[in-house]
Image (cartoon, rainbow, N blue to C red):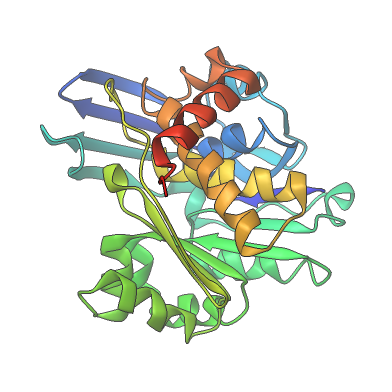
Amino acid sequence: MPLIVTGSIGIDSIQAPTGDADDVLGGSCTHFAAAASFFTKARIVAAVGDDFPEHHLATMEQFNVDLAGLEKRAGSKTFRWRGKYHENMNDRDTLEVDLNVLAEALPPVPEDYKNSQYVFLANTHPAAQLDMLNQFPGRRLSIADTMDLWIETERESLLELLSKIDGLVLNDSEAIMLTEDSNTVRAADRILETGPKFVVVKKGEHGAFLVHQDGHVVLPAFPARNVVDPTGAGDSFAGGMMGCLAATGDLSIDGLRQAMAYGTIVASFNIESFSLTRLTEIERGHIDERLEQFRQMTVIGA
């Protein structure tokens, strides 16, 4: 079924214990769409500036992604993020953020995209997410991501968004910040009270858990020996999850469990390189093979 995503497409500069990477392709929409493309064709609605490098566009074209909704905007500059990871690779400092085109209005949704039934609102301004959501009244599933910046500065718009979506994906610190509850399970319960049917809380190397109206799911992360760059791990997790849901159409709690497992595996590949490099090197078969390894690891005997 048609899957559409909006969010940031940016240029990242990263300092990590594994090395530095300057001016690499990044952004929430980028990582999400690349991950989702292993399961279904992802449609993008996003903008970049006229400084966006052609070689980054060529990288995006390697994936099963529809770029008709990507606008290269004259006179604007591309979103940029610069960050530094600590030795444990879990904690990071944002050194610089230039919103640039991300602070402007989204491009119009192409007519061919308006039949999209699976809508993912990757991390961007809640007002832009709301505007995007309202253009798909016939949607079957809508899920959003957010971040601490919007929780701090755009809480009212974010709460309005939560009242209209089916699911929210966020990390544990964001769940705590949003609800002011230090217990992440209780925090997820409180988020459900604002409107969504389910909440997926990402816990980095400790996996993710789902709090749903119909029950709970807990999954560990795939054991990673080679963590090069965690940037985009959460977005690739969401992309794998949403891509699987759009491909299968199974929105039951069992379907969500399967989708979360696929998201976990795609993210485990994503962290093995800077930017999207590792995802350009694999095929769906590699994902399925690692998923089977993951399944065997998580089976509990009688």
Residue lying at 22% horizontally and 45% vertically, measured from the top left: 94
Which percent across, then down, holds residue 46? Answer: 62, 46
Across the whole image, how many numbered discs are drawn on residues? 0
Residue lying at 40% horizontally and 35% vertically, measured from the top left: 297
In the image, residue 193 sits, relative to residue 89, either above or below, namely below
Lateral position of residue 18 relative to residue 24, left or right: left
Question: In this rendering, does residue 29 appear at all?
Answer: yes
Which percent across, then down, holds residue 137? Answer: 80, 72
In the image, residue 53 sits, relative to residue 197, either above or below, namely above
Residue 80 lies in what quarter of the image? top left
| Camera-side residue of 225 and 278 | 225
Q: From this viewpoint, which residue is outermost toward the left?
A: 87
| Camera-side residue of 85 and 40 | 40
Lateral position of residue 179 relative to residue 162, left or right: left
Residue 74 lies in what quarter of the image? top right
Residue lying at 56% horizontally and 19% vertically, measured from the top left: 286
In the image, residue 286 sits, relative to residue 203, either above or below, namely above
Lateral position of residue 112 relative to residue 59, left or right: right
Q: From this viewpoint, which residue is outermost toward the bottom?
A: 193
Q: From this viewpoint, which residue is outermost toward the front?
A: 302
Which percent across, then down, holds residue 22? Answer: 31, 21
Residue lying at 88% horizontally and 52% vertically, measured from the top left: 111
Question: In this rendering, does residue 45 appear at all?
Answer: no
Which percent across, then down, holds residue 172? Answer: 30, 61
Lateral position of residue 30 relative to residue 61, left or right: left
